[in-house]
Image: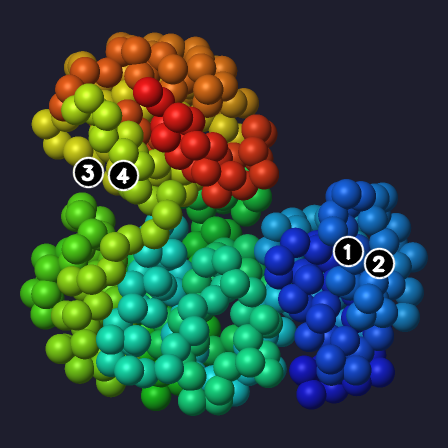
Amino acid sequence: MNATQLSGKRVLVVGLARSGNAAAAVLVGRGADVVAFDRDEAVGVGRLLELGVEVHTGREEEKLLQGTDLVVKSPGVPGETRLVAGARRRGIPVWSEVELGAQLLPNPLLGVTGTNGKTTTSELLGEVFRAADRPVEVAGNVGRPLTSLVGVARPDTWIVCELSSFQLEDVETLNPEIGILLNLEPDHLDRHGSLESYSDAKLRIFERQSSEDTAVVPRGFGTVPGAGRRAEFDAADELPAEPLIPGSHNRENAAAATVAARAAGIPDEAIAKGLRTFPGVPHRIELVRELRGVRYVNDSKATNVAAALRALASFPGSRLHVILGGRGKAESYESLAAAFGSGDRGYLIGESAQEIADAFGSAGVSYSAAGSLVVALAEATASARAGDVVLLSPACASFDQFEDFEARGDEFRRLVEALS
């Protein structure tokens, strides 16, 4: 089936966070008979009830699949959950929320994926399009669900859509006119099971591209699926302007954004303006404040080892006090330990603290088993001296102690701002 055939169909929406709520609302507007489910009994469902959605929470019951024509899955819902796996066994189509949005939106789409840098590059592209006075919306994994733009965005508006592996694993027709793969490093192995499976999900961004589309990839990257015109980038590329945001990884993001913007017909003058004015995104190497010569930096968005390594490399010459830990993703922490200088120190929190401690102990890295963010910040503040950096860059997901990485970063910011 496709999105033009939704009227009168029974659609089960699984997962009722932002994406699920937006998808359910759009489905109701298209005349579907919508049933919604979330395991969290405390999830907010008031708006859905007002729309006439049949809402179920708590225990997964496969009887919810009876008579179902389509399942729409939020990105946080693993494919092996009872309802999703049951739908596949019964031959019921399973779409991600972005697949639903892509089918319903007539707009030109610029998709951005990769292990790290997706949000920064997506928001940077939004800034570049606005500098060129081109209508644009930024959506997807960046925070605004793609389906929330249905009936809102003008047909000529470009949509820059950040795409995670969780969103891409359940697409059938999604076909960005311009697709970007920023990088590909181990992440989410706890869910995908292997680097190969994770890579396959990421590369689905290119699968349906035609010769009229553009695939933007790192210079020297291997073969990609689809027939899109290949365009390459790397951090050494000549840019129309140097980016305001610091770090070699951000210059690489800027190079990818430049190639994609040119493919969309954006002139270099507008690209230069965007690069010079874009300040970065919250929770990604975000300077919270400087106190008594110590810089406090929020990098809560570093939810994997590769992202944390980029943050550590962003402060050459400074002694680092790094708050690390959370819910691990089946990654090794040896490379992280190797990146610490002789004067640097780690402050370990969350479920993965012992795993990180083992890697640090083997490498001779100084660390403290702080346990919580409050204790870690207090210890780091007590040890830091003028010229040092206190850096929250966890290298792990947040879900053991916080609702999401934003909540973790917000708490770090609140605690830092309260320091006297």
Residue 141: image tag: none
Say which amino acid is labelled 3: Ser
Q: Is residue 8 visible?
A: yes
Label 1 sits on residue: 45
Image quadrant containing the N terminus: bottom right
Q: Amino acid at mark 2?
A: Val
Near mark 1 (Cα within 10 A), the count class, few <14, some 14-19 or many ≥20, is many
Q: Could you tell me which quadrant the C terminus lies in?
A: top left
Which residue bears the numbered disc 4?
A: 287
Residue that numbered label 2 is attached to: 55
Mark 4: amino acid:
Leu
Disc 3 and disc 1: Cα gap in Å?
Answer: 42 Å
* Residue occupying image coordinates x 67% and y 82%: 3
Instruction: Calculate the distance from the C-alpha at mark 1 to the C-alpha at mark 4.
Output: 36 Å
Between the residue at mark 3 and the residue at mark 2, the CA separation in whole angstroms equals 46 Å
Pointer 3 residue = 314
Disc 2 packing (10 Å; few <14; some 14–19; many ≥20): some
Q: Is residue 155 above or below residue 98?
A: below
Q: Dot 2 lies on which element?
A: strand
- Residue that extends furthest to the front in the rendered view of this protein: 420
Q: Secondary structure at mark 4?
A: strand
Which quadrant holds residue 9?
Answer: bottom right
Nearer-N-terminus badge (2/1): 1
Image depth: mark 3 or mark 1 in front: 1
Q: CA distance from mark 2 to mark 4?
A: 42 Å
Give the mark nearest the N terminus, 3 or 4.
4
Question: Quick one: 399 or 234, which is closer to the camera?
Answer: 399
- Location of residue 238 with respect to 353 vertically, above or below: below
